């Protein structure tokens, strides 16, 4: 604590330079926080995917259906313990911009396979008993101000009713929350039977199957057995782990992780040059002062510590404020109005940010600190 006046005196020497250096660090870590939240949003579901769940889709593409009759054959494959299915609806609520996933499912098996969904028991029972009912994620319910009991009209873009009617109406029987952060709470789930008995075409077909297996270590073996079961059929299949499926889906918009790493690498390299130049200039300008400190009895290690502490304080303050500001803003939720519903900064990213602050401070201050430590008193005073 007794050296703090010396550190602050160094900052006050060139106040504008110190301010802009700290502001640059603050902005860089604010950007780091937002890019981390964007990465989380685009990879939503990847990290929380179940190790014991597989996804089966049509071998041609995800948009091609699979027969409902496959369900019993899947259950008969060795290693499979349970199976459910989903079918994409893709309707419009009020405006095409109001996108959220609408999926027709088998309610009972879907809730068993996805224990991450928290549903009040009375709402769960109501949904199971109401063929026209829907279970909605908390994020979507709050986005549109929906509550239990509301009747929601959705206009079909694909699944037209018999007779050509495009208007479907659902009753919100329940709102689900996530047991763990990162699980998707934007889904609008409704009964597959309601869809299947009312739609005009593609009867008894589903979009994909979700399969639970007994042993996650045998996922590759069970995957092979499942696809072999339907080889040479009219609807051949492609099965993969749920995590691999979620990652492939996220990568359709590009390798978000690689893009963000490239951006952050460029930002931090530039920032390293800026902070390092500030520290080096500060040492050059105070050559005589450092020599006087050594004359007064400061050891080489003390001088090294002072210069490093100055870099740590300047960069650390800017980085800590940037991270804190990022966390505060991101905690307010999705800034896009629904496009990035899982918009949050993970604890791992915050910890990594803190490590980056420390690494940047050390890297930018180490060389000037070593220069100051090696400074010879006679040569330094001769330059004055």
Image: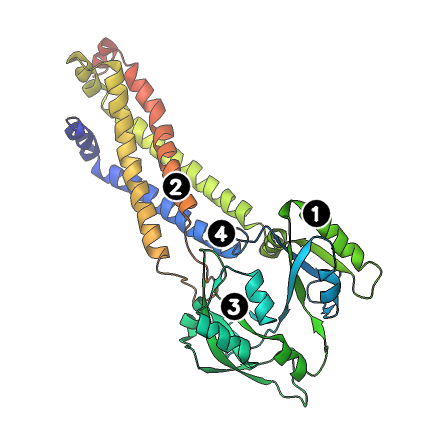
- Residue located farthest toward the top when viewing the structure as drawn: 378
Look at mark 1 in the image and give the residue it sits on: 220
- Label 2 and label 1: CA atoms lie apart by 34 Å
**Residue at the spot x=75%, y=63% of the render?**
73
Look at mark 2 in the image and give the residue it sits on: 351
Q: Nearer the viewer, mark 3 or mark 1?
A: 1
- Label 1 and label 4: CA atoms lie apart by 28 Å
Mark 3, residues whose alpha carbon is within 10 Å: few (<14), some, or many (≥20)?
some
Is 7 located above or below residue 317 in the figure?
above
- Label 3 and label 1: CA atoms lie apart by 29 Å
Say left or right for 81 vs 349.
Answer: right
Look at mark 4 in the image and give the residue it sits on: 39
Sequence-wise, the earlier of marks 4 and 3 is: 4
- Label 2 and label 3: CA atoms lie apart by 30 Å
Q: Does dot 1 land on a helix, a strand or a loop?
A: helix
- Label 2 and label 4: CA atoms lie apart by 16 Å
Is 100 located above or below residue 384 in the figure?
below
Sequence-wise, the earlier of marks 3 and 1 is: 3
Q: Does dot 4 land on a helix, a strand or a loop?
A: helix
**Residue at the spot x=58%, y=69% of the render?**
108
Sequence-wise, the earlier of marks 1 and 4 is: 4
Specify the quadrant that holds the N terminus.
Answer: top left
Sequence-wise, the earlier of marks 2 and 4 is: 4
């Amino acid at each position: 604590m007794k050296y703090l006046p010396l550190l602050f005196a160094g900052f006050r020497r060139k106040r504008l330079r110190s301010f802009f250096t700290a502001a640059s660090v603050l902005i860089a870590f604010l950007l780091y926080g937002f890019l981390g939240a964007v990465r989380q949003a685009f990879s939503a579901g990847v990290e929380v995917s179940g190790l014991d769940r597989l996804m089966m889709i049509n071998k041609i593409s995800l948009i091609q259906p699979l027969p409902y009759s496959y369900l019993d054959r899947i259950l008969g494959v060795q290693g499979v313990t349970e199976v459910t299915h989903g079918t994409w609806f893709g309707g419009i609520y009020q405006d095409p911009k109001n996108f959220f996933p609408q999926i027709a499912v088998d309610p009972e098996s879907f809730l068993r396979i996805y224990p991450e969904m928290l549903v009040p028991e009375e709402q769960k029972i109501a949904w199971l008993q109401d063929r026209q009912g829907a279970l909605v994620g908390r994020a979507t319910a709050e986005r549109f101000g929906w509550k239990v009991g509301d009747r929601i009209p959705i206009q079909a873009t694909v699944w037209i009713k018999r007779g050509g009617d495009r208007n479907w109406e659902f009753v919100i029987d329940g709102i689900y929350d996530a047991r763990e952060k990162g699980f998707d709470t934007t889904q609008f789930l409704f009964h597959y039977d309601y869809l299947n008995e009312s739609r005009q075409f593609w009867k008894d077909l589903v979009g994909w199957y979700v399969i639970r297996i007994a042993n996650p270590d045998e996922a590759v073996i069970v995957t092979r057995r499942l696809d072999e079961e339907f080889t040479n059929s009219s609807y051949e299949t492609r099965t993969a782990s749920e995590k691999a499926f979620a990652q492939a889906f996220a990568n359709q918009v590009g390798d978000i992780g690689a893009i963000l790493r490239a951006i952050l690498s460029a930002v931090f390299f530039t920032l390293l040059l800026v902070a390092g130049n500030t520290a080096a200039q500060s040492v050059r300008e105070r050559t005589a002062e450092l020599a006087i400190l050594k004359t007064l009895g400061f050891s080489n290690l003390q001088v090294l510590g002072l210069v490093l502490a100055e870099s740590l304080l300047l960069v650390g303050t800017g980085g800590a404020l940037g991270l804190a500001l990022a966390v505060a803003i991101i905690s307010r939720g999705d800034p896009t109005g629904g496009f990035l519903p899982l918009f949050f900064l993970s604890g791992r990213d915050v910890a990594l940010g803190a490590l980056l602050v420390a690494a940047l401070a050390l890297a930018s201050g180490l060389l000037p600190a070593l220069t100051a430590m090696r400074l010879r008193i006679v040569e330094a005073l001769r330059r004055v």
